[in-house]
Image (cartoon, rainbow, N blue to C red):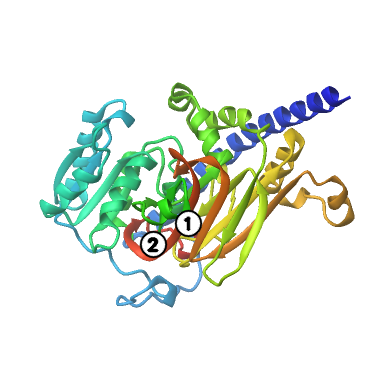
Amino acid sequence: MDRTLLALGVISVVIMAVALVLLVVVLRQLMRHRRELAELRRLLQQPGREPQAKGPAEPAAPADSEHPDAGGAPPAPARVQRVAVVLNPSKFDDPEEFRTRVREVVEGLEGAEVAFYETTVEDPGRGQTRQALMDGADLVIAAGGDGTVRMVAAVLAGTDTRMAIIPSGTGNLLARNLGVPLEDPSAAMTAALTGHDRNIDVGWLRKGGSLNEAVHAAEQIFLVIAGFGADAEMIGHTDPVLKKRFGWIAYVLGGARTILGRSVDVVLDFPDGTRHAHKARTVLLGNVGKLPGGFVLMPGATADNGHLEIVVAGWKGPAGFSQVLTEVVTPKLVPRGRLAESTRLSSMDRYQSTEVRVATTRPQPVQLDGDTDAEATHMIARIDPGALRLRVPRDTELTTL
């Protein structure tokens, strides 16, 4: 009987995974159409173009509006004199062609000087960013995956130097949440030159095999989500070849091995003195909450609200995992009331805080924005409000950050 239930559970997860992939394909097409429509609207609103609809003209926004939230037009982006591109060449099929395209965009729109700083295995971006600052760059662009973005941001956080992103990784999580074009480097470069400056929050994480070790550990930056447990296992199990070929969908395949793992005892401590104990497979610390495919894991996580959103999730077997997946993908289908209590094989609890300490007795793998790290039993995370000055596209609303 147990084997039959297990088989049915596995089959249900596989069916849901296939349905999820198909849904993602459809959503990606819809998102592409939305971007095209947004770009068309932007072009139609440029000065010198005739409006298409008849009727009384609306009054123009004041030219000196200081902030888009005030109801006026956003201020014109400050011009830059020297652009530094911290480039991860392994993320581009033809790095030289990429350089040429970037130079063409910068020279055509800004007339600024451009310099490229290639990352290496030994130095994935920090040293190059420091050198760019020493060379006088006033806009530093991270061209690569989420790891490159993290390394550049780790140096620029707390400074006045602007940062931008040309995404070319597997997840491109921060770029997705900010509306940066994902598949067109020229469009991403244009957004970097013509977009708005926004101060976004930055997460910092310390970890160790004990509380004392974590307290004295060096802080590591994360901009999207840091994780502890099953999510880090999923990333660690994902084949790099599949990632390069299929992109973030490879994580779905890598995640199959994490479904049958056991929950562990986890304790969360907050600055107000409250403490919460859970049985959990994963603890997620989010600065922003949108995942590939448009799914929102953390609705309350926005990059400028000065808080982390903490999600603690646990489940029993494939059936329990399918419940967690349903709550993320289609929360309206989650059972409520007595039916939920009698059929619940999972849990998902959410908190918001400026800081949190997470502890467990069994070492768990750790990840920061998709980069795996050594196992730990203790994590200390905090939010650094408005620490990073980031260029976002002109049509990115503050409420989507």
In the foreground, 206 or 307: 206
- Where disc 1 sits, the SS reads loop
In primary-sequence order, the first of circles 2 and 1 is: 2
Q: Position of residue 250 (x, y in %)?
A: 53, 28
Give left or right: position of 355 versus 102: right
Q: Position of residue 261 (x, y in %)?
A: 65, 34
**Structural crowding at the residue carrying mark 1, measured as other residues with C-alpha within 10 Å and reported as few (<14), some (14–19) or many (≥20):** many
- Locate residue 311: give its quadrant: bottom right
- Locate residue 393: give its quadrant: bottom left
> Residue placed at 58% from the left, 34% from the top?
25
In the foreground, 129 or 97: 129
C-alpha distance separating marks 2 and 1: 9 Å
Q: Is residue 178 visible?
A: yes
- Which residue has dot 2 on it? 200
**Vertical placement of residue 48 versus 93, above or below:** below
> Residue placed at 74% from the left, 43% from the top?
323
- Where disc 2 sits, the SS reads strand
Q: Position of residue 375 (x, y in %)?
A: 47, 39
What amino acid type is highlighted by mark number 2?
A: Ile
- Which residue has dot 1 on it? 287
**Vertical placement of residue 280 versus 232, above or below:** below
**Structural crowding at the residue carrying mark 2, measured as other residues with C-alpha within 10 Å and reported as few (<14), some (14–19) or many (≥20):** many
